[in-house]
Amino acid sequence: MVNSKTNCMKYRIIEETYRNEYGEMKRKVYTIKRQKSFLGIRYWSSVKHKECGGFDIYNKVTEFQTHSEAHDFIVNVLCGNEGRDEWNYKVVSEFDCTIPKQIGKP
C-alpha cells in the first residue's frame, strides 16, 4: 500500500551552516524540505518531528549530520513504508484465563 501522504511528493535536501562573528563555521546540518500546495500555490516546507521539552510538546525541524543520512531518510521513511513520528503495535502473546488448566500439559 502506498502512503498517500507522501505519494508524488518532491523533496529537497538543504545544507545549513552557521558561522560565528569571525566567519568561522561552527555548525553544519542537513534538513529536508517537502513541496506542498495550498489553493494551487506551491511552496516548500521543512520536514519536522515532535519533541518534548519540560511540560510542552513542539514541532522541531528534523536535522541530519550528513547528506547521505538525509537521503536515506527520504528513500526509506518519507517515500518508503517505515513509520514516522508514530507508535506501532502488534500482538506478541495472548492468554485466555477462562480455560481451566489441564494436568500434564504446560
Image: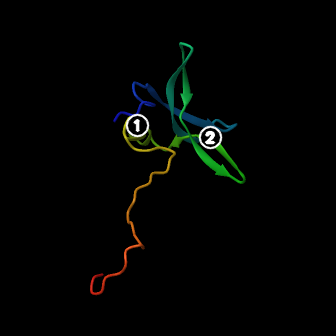
Classify residue 48 by image quadrant. Answer: top right
Instruction: Pick out the residue farthest to the top.
Output: 40
**Image location (x, y in percent) of residue 104:** 27, 87
Residue at 39% from the left image edge and 66% from the top image edge: 94
User: Where residue 36 sits in the image (x, y, percent)?
Assistant: 52, 23
Q: Nearer the viewer, residue 96 or 43?
A: 96
Q: Assign a secondary structure to mark 2.
A: strand
Q: Earlier in the sequence, mark 1 or mark 2?
A: 2
Q: Nearer the viewer, residue 90 or 25?
A: 90
Image quadrant containing the C terminus: bottom left
Instruction: Please tell me whether mark 1 sits on a helix, a strand or a loop.
Output: helix
Q: Is residue 97 above or below residue 7?
A: below
Q: Is residue 41 left or right of residue 57?
A: left
* Relative image position of residue 34 (x, y in whole percent): 50, 28
Give whichever of 64, 35 is nearer the camera.
35
- The reply to whether residue 93 is visible in this rendering is yes
Locate residue 31 relative to residue 74 in the image: left or right. Answer: right
Residue flagged by tag 1: what amino acid is it? His
Q: Position of residue 37 (x, y in %)?
A: 53, 19
According to the picture, the residue beneath numbered tag 1 turns out to be 71
Q: Nearer the viewer, mark 1 or mark 2?
A: 2
Amino acid type assigned to the residue bearing label 2 in the image: Asn
Residue 59 is marked as: 2
Q: Residue at x 39, y 59 (%)?
A: 91
Q: Quadrant of residue 46?
A: top right
Determine the CA span between mark 1 and mark 2: 21 Å
Q: Residue at x 42, y 43 (%)?
A: 69
